[in-house]
Amino acid sequence: MPLIVTGTVGIDTVYTPDHGHRENVLGGSCTYFAAAASFYCKPVRVVAAVGEDFPPELRQTMDRFEGIDHAGLEVRKGSKTFRWGGKYLDNMDQRETLYTDLGVLAEEPPAVPKAFRDSRYVFLANTHPAVQLGLLEQLPQRRLAVADTMDLWIETARPELERLCGLIDGLVLNFDEAEQLTGKRNTVAAARRILDLGPRFVVVKKGEHGCLIVHKDGIAALPAYPTEEVVDPTGAGDSFAGGMMGALAREADADESLDPSAFGAIHRAVAHGTIVASFNIERFSLDRLATLTRAELDERYRRFAGMVRFG
């Protein structure tokens, strides 16, 4: 069940109001996604680039997650790794960016290795839509393709983003980004307008308020899992997407007759993504996911299912 993710591997520095800060820790969209997805399916193929300054100890952290194939991770001589620094505000739902050093992100994107081009489940993590389009073209055997985006691309690369929407099965974005893209303040109305661009479903993330699924065959809402202690929200969205796509790939691969973009499949997968993200935010970087067990994951999923079931 080859699942592939394209995006970033980076080095983060994170400041929080209640739990201090961490400098030069592992970050990046591919990193969080692949770690989360690896609990559900194998292999998880990573396509990204780092510079020759990427620390060996961070590579060792990545290697702690079994089932992740890093053959598509380019290490570029003479280049610098993408770095980001951020500070979370008191409510932990908002942050300010302290610095962004693009490094390899300012260079040509990595190519999809030939051995990866048979990947059937594709997640295009947040990057320029033109880059996402180029990567998607290299994956002709895809069965399901989902993309993430952000406000910057909505503002500066809307034509490419709208073209991408016509080629993918699903789009994941925040509620304010959905409004920015469509001009609709109502989240349901905004998601329906995005469906008109081509995707079969849209997952709108609302932070501590959970998420909304708007599908051509129905609508569903899920709350966030009530985590008692939030240490570091960095990577929550990417680990959410990793859990979602990993669960979809596992379920669809077990039954070839299943449509992985069907409403029921998406609903179940989003619940798994919610649970993985709830663990991710309990520690800095990937520290919590690195110690997470399958038993812990299944038990929290069971509790979550009980919380949202009624009648």
Image (spheres, rainbow, N blue to C red):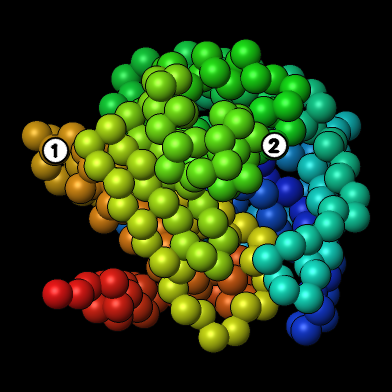
User: Is the C terminus in the top left, top right, bottom left or bottom right quadrant?
Assistant: bottom left
Q: Residue 39 appears in which quarter of the rendering?
A: bottom left
Is residue 121 at all visible to an observer of this figure? no
Above or below for 282 versus 202? below
User: Is the N terminus in the top left, top right, bottom left or bottom right quadrant?
Assistant: top left
Residue 258 is tagged as 1
Q: In the image, what residue occupies the spot 90% across and 55% down?
A: 98
- Mark 2 or 1, nearer chain start: 2
What residue does disc 2 label?
Answer: 151
Q: In the image, what residue occupies the spot 32% across and 20% down?
A: 141
Left or right: 283 as drawn, with respect to 270 = right
- Count residues near mark 1 (Cα–Cα under 10 Å), then give few for <14, some for 14-19, many for 20+: few
**Separation of marks 2 and 1 at Cα, in angstroms:** 33 Å
Name the one closer to the observer, 297 or 227: 227
Left or right: 221 as drawn, with respect to 160 = left
Amino acid on which disc 2 is placed: Asp
Amino acid on which disc 1 is placed: Leu
Q: Secondary structure at mark 1?
A: loop
Q: Position of residue 196 (x, y in %)?
A: 41, 21
Q: Residue 184 appears in which quarter of the rendering?
A: top right
Above or below for 19 versus 92? below
